[in-house]
Image (cartoon, rainbow, N blue to C red):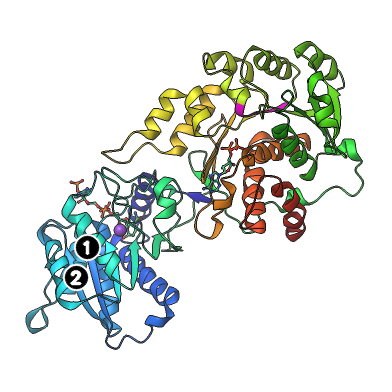
Amino acid sequence: MSNLMTGGQMRTHEQAVIGGGSVTGLALMQRAGQGVFDAISQAFPELSDACGRRALILCGPGNNGGDGFVVAHLLAAAGWAVDVALLGEAGHLPPDAAANHARWVGTGAKRRDVLSLDQVVPLIAAQGAPDLVVDAVFGTGLRRGLSADVVEALRVSIEAARHSVAVDILSGLCADSGKWLGQAADLTVDLTVTFHTAKPGHYLAAGGRATRRLVIVDIGLPVQSARIEDAELIDAPAYSGEVARKDPASHKYGSGHALVLSGGPGRTGAARLAARAALRIGAGLVTIAVPPGAQQEVACQITAIMLTRVADSEALGVVLEDKRYSALCLGPGLGVGERTRSLVSEALSAGRSVVLDADALTSFADDPMSLFEQVRGADVVLTPHGGEFARLFPDLAEQLRAVAETGPAVSKIDVVRAAAARAGCTVLLKGADTVIAAPDGRVRVHAACRERAAPWLATAGAGDVLAGFVTGLMARGLEPLEAASHATWLHVECARAFGPGLIAEDLPEALPGVLKALL
Ligand SMILES: NC(=O)C1=CN([C@@H]2O[C@H](COP(=O)(O)OP(=O)(O)OC[C@H]3O[C@@H](n4cnc5c(N)ncnc54)[C@H](OP(=O)(O)O)[C@@H]3O)[C@@H](O)[C@H]2O)[C@@H](O)CC1
Ligand SMILES: Nc1ncnc2c1ncn2[C@@H]1O[C@H](COP(=O)(O)OP(=O)(O)O)[C@@H](O)[C@H]1O
Ligand SMILES: [K+]
């Protein structure tokens, strides 16, 4: 896993390193610009012959613009015809950007013109499409939404150019949250080149869709050891290798016994999906607890999975006298109301690992604190989708939903971290971008975007399978944050392995192939 650093963390780190005297801001800017140039050459080999190529570089009023001037210089040196447009006054640029602006403009007979940003649209109308547009208008310093003329210049350039590249992050996106500040511009570039680490805004919300490729350039800043305030990205190509391995000497009870509670007649499918997922991910045994009226329905659809009758919370208490049940899953298809609340309370009081999903969460919509009092400090994972999250944490959901006028905006990381602290247990908020937070502040991010896109995963029952994966891994003894992280990565991996046409039943069946590939 790698760290995701916010704009603020990046600035603090950069200032500390510059303050230490080992490097100057100007040198970092040169490395950043060189990194963008190299990434362009690598991503678009068809541009290697610079003869007759035209580039348009859009520079902003801060250091992101400074990076743009470095890129302009390198492209021109390589033989490109380069136009540069600047937003704002050259005289107001910060020192390092001003130095690179001056270098670009040159002196005497070799002076070059710098256009103003409002000359960009007429330039493209007159000259036709450039081969390359580089967006160096705003990076991590974006503080408010783009004005309409900036959006227009960006849109026309990006849509016209054959190749589009954003320096650090596409202008208009908040680097911390991936949200558009102000009005959403909904632009997409071919390539984004960022520095030192990826930022949350490259993965969260609109940020995950705003670039087709992301390249992270090492600009020589020292790598910081992991700190609790850094969100970690679940990104390793073979993340869940440890899950694929089992102790050769263990027996089935060594891998735990998962109990999945089912809803009544006609509502048992979700629990069966979760149970199959828990078994496939390696729980040694899986049992479905069914209300008596649904016994027939479940019995005729399971084989390796076992069944026990559980009419109510008292019956659940009796079942849980068997201490070998190591993890429980409640929620999928369970029904909303008092019965579910009492089953949840019984499960939590038994002191096992517990996954609460779907109806088990919605059942506490009227009094979320009564749930949090029971889960605090226990090995519990809550797995809400956006709607369920809003029922338990309405204020946090509102902060996440609100249009952000100023940056940095509240991010999915911020709200899930706050939710986990409030609930006192691990919270996994689902979506194309999934954020998992432990109550101690650790956060993991998985984004099903770009090379990990899994659009077929947005299918009924996929969430039940995820709950089953988490349950199975907790049954095997993984701690909540680890179980949730591996389950999330494997869930997407199964969807990617199966591909188009995926339905929820296919996910557990794709898992053996995925696990085998990890060994
Ligand atoms: N950190 C590092 O290690 C390294 C960083 N590097 C580079 O520096 C970049 C960060 O530079 P940065 O801090 O100068 O911010 P940047 O994004 O250029 O913008 C700030 C300017 O924009 C203005 N402004 C903001 N929003 C606005 C709006 N909506 N509309 C209009 N104006 C607006 C704001 O003005 P103000 O808010 O003060 O009015 C200020 O003038 C980073 O992304 C990377 O590319 C690399 O060189 C190497 C190492
Ligand atoms: N666009 C998407 N790309 C990747 N994964 C997605 C996308 N949309 C939803 N998912 C995933 O699909 C699952 C849907 O779960 P959920 O909303 O609970 O549905 P259900 O209740 O029908 O099972 C979650 O794991 C979520 O992260
Ligand atoms: K940019």
At horizontal 67% and vertical 28% (from top left) the residue drawn is 333
Drawn side of residue 376 relative to residue 519, left or right: left
Q: Which mark is residue 59?
A: 1
Quadrant of the image occupied by residue 363: top right
- Structural distance between the alpha carbons of marks 1 and 2: 7 Å
Q: Amino acid at mark 2?
A: Val
Q: Is residue 337 magenta?
A: no
Q: Which residues are magenta?
A: 353-358
Direction from residue 171 to residue 329 in the image, left or right: right
In the image, the residue with mark 2 has its CB under 8 Å from the nearest atom of ligand 3: no
Residue where numbered disc 2 is placed: 84
The answer to whether the residues at label 1 and label 2 have Cβ atoms under 8 Å apart is yes
Kind of element beneath mark 1: strand
> Is residue 102 visible in the rendered structure shown here?
yes
462 left or right of 208?
A: right
Element carrying mark 2 = strand
Number of residues whose C-alpha sits closer than 10 Å to that of mark 2, classed few (under 14), some (14–19) or many (20 or more): many
- Residue drawn at (77%, 53%) of the image: 512
Q: Earlier in the sequence, mark 1 or mark 2?
A: 1
**Residue 383 vs residue 108, the one in the foreground:** 383
User: Looking at the picture, how far across and down is residue 199, in whole percent?
Assistant: 42, 51
Position in image of residue 33 (x %, y %): 33, 68
